[in-house]
Amino acid sequence: MVIFLMMANKPILYQSYRRRKGGINNHDSNMREYGELNGGYNLLDIGFGDGDSIINLSTDSPINIFGVDTYHVGFNKILKLKSKKNLKDLYLIQGDIVDIIDSFPPNFFDKVHIFFPDPWPKRKHHKRRFLNEYFLEKLREKLKKDNQIHFASDHINFFLDTKKLISRFLNIEIEFLQNRVKRPVTKYELKALKNKHKVFEILFSL
Ligand SMILES: C[S@@+](CC[C@H](N)C(=O)[O-])C[C@H]1O[C@@H](n2cnc3c(N)ncnc32)[C@H](O)[C@@H]1O
């Protein structure tokens, strides 16, 4: 019970993200626009990093894509590419997803990508993992009824902790996927494969 209550606390953003040059909490659009996008297919990519996967996704599909990351270098890089390729359906926000999520309307997202989030393997750092009961509750409010969340990691212990967290949250046993389902290849996935790490993934709905 004590463990459950501790897990329900607000995740603590790694201080170094706040100190990084460029600060946090930048966005490339007017948040008020989001309400107008309510009827479309909306995908949220949490922690898009500095890879190009979000750009490829945006070029390939006629959907609204919202990318959130704390990392200003990645944010600025993707912002430039967005403008160069004139990607009007891509919305970029730099900041902590745990706070940013509040700025979206309820019942907004169809799909969420969480690819290779920081595993924070040491127990004393688990409080930095943004995926916990506190965040899942918040996220649930922002999802449409038929929603899909895709989580992938090459860190076995983090993956098993997350699988357990979600199974407990939903009160059903979530199974990991036996085969890779269609998703963009990210920079961290390439890194994992280069290091011969196995990639584990789950698909679930909240
Ligand atoms: C290990 S990288 C993975 C990047 C990308 N998804 C990939 O697979 O290549 C994790 C990313 O999550 C971002 N991140 C960490 N905590 C975050 C938070 N609370 N809100 C938004 N982004 C976060 C980091 O800045 C980093 O870019």
Image: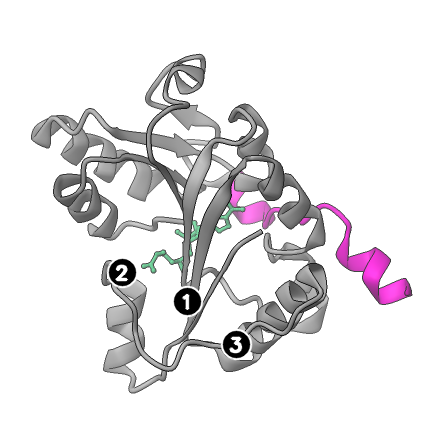
Foreground disc of the pair 1, 3: 3
Residue occupying the point 60% across, 55% down? 131
Rendering coords of residue 73 (x, y %) = 31, 41
> How much space separates mark 1 and mark 3, taking CA atoms?
13 Å
Residue occupying the point 50% across, 81% down? 156
Residue 12 visible within the image: no
Residue 179 as seen in the image, left or right of residue 24: left
Asked if the residue at tag 1 contacts the one at tag 2, i.e. Cβ–Cβ closer than 8 Å, the answer is: yes
Q: Residues within 10 Å of mark 3 (few under 14, many from 20)?
A: few
Q: What SS does tag 3 mark?
A: loop
**Kind of residue at badge 2:** Arg
Q: Residue 175, labelled with which disc?
A: 3
Tell me if residue 21 comes above or below residue 168 in the rendering. Answer: above
Foreground disc of the pair 2, 1: 2
The residue tagged 2 is: 183
Residue 17 visible within the image: yes
The image quarter in which residue 88 lies: top left
Rendering coords of residue 75 (x, y %) = 32, 37
Numbered range of the magenta stretch: 1-18
Residue 40 as seen in the image, left or right of residue 17: left
